[in-house]
Image (cartoon, helix red, strand yellow):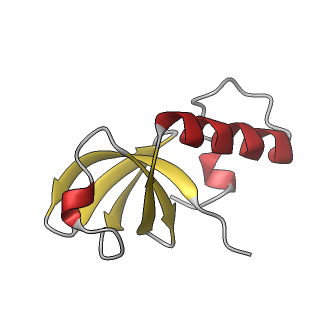
Amino acid sequence: MCIGVPMIVESVEGMLATCIARGCRRDVSLMLIGEDAVEPGAHVLVHQNIAMDVITAEHASLIWEAFDLALGADAPRGEPEFEEIAEC
């Protein structure tokens, strides 16, 4: 099973976006969704540094809540337990 991690787009340059999630910044390929599909502030679902889909902020929040429950995270939302899901 693959896990998609919600991230927020910070910048877009061609088919590459710089995205952040809980303090972890990544360069993410936009090859599957296209560079015109996102702009800074958009939420994307990322797997293996590839954006798979554009999602809403509400959907991203629900995914993070599920991760927190599954991992038993006690830290307040926004802390970098993201590293437990995907190494920075």
**Picture quadrant where residue 79 is located:** top right
Q: Residue at x 79, y 36 (%)?
A: 73
> Disc count in the image?
0
Identify whether 21 is placed above or below 13: above
Percent position (x, y) of residue 15? 20, 70
Q: Is 7 left, or right, of 29 in this rendering?
A: right
**Picture quadrant where residue 36 is located:** bottom left
The front one of 27 and 7 is: 7
Residue occupying the far top of the picture:
76
Identify whether 51 is placed above or below 6: below
Task: Tell me the quarter of the image containing the N terminus.
Answer: bottom right
Percent position (x, y) of residue 17? 26, 58
Q: Is 7 left, or right, of 30 in this rendering?
A: right
The front one of 52 and 27 is: 52
Q: Residue at x 55, y 34 (%)?
A: 58
The front one of 56 and 87 is: 56
Identify whether 46 is placed above or below 66: below
Q: Residue at x 29, y 54 (%)?
A: 18
Identify whether 17 is placed above or below 23: below
Q: Is 86 left, or right, of 1 in this rendering?
A: left
Percent position (x, y) of residue 13? 14, 60
Residue occupying the far left of the picture:
14
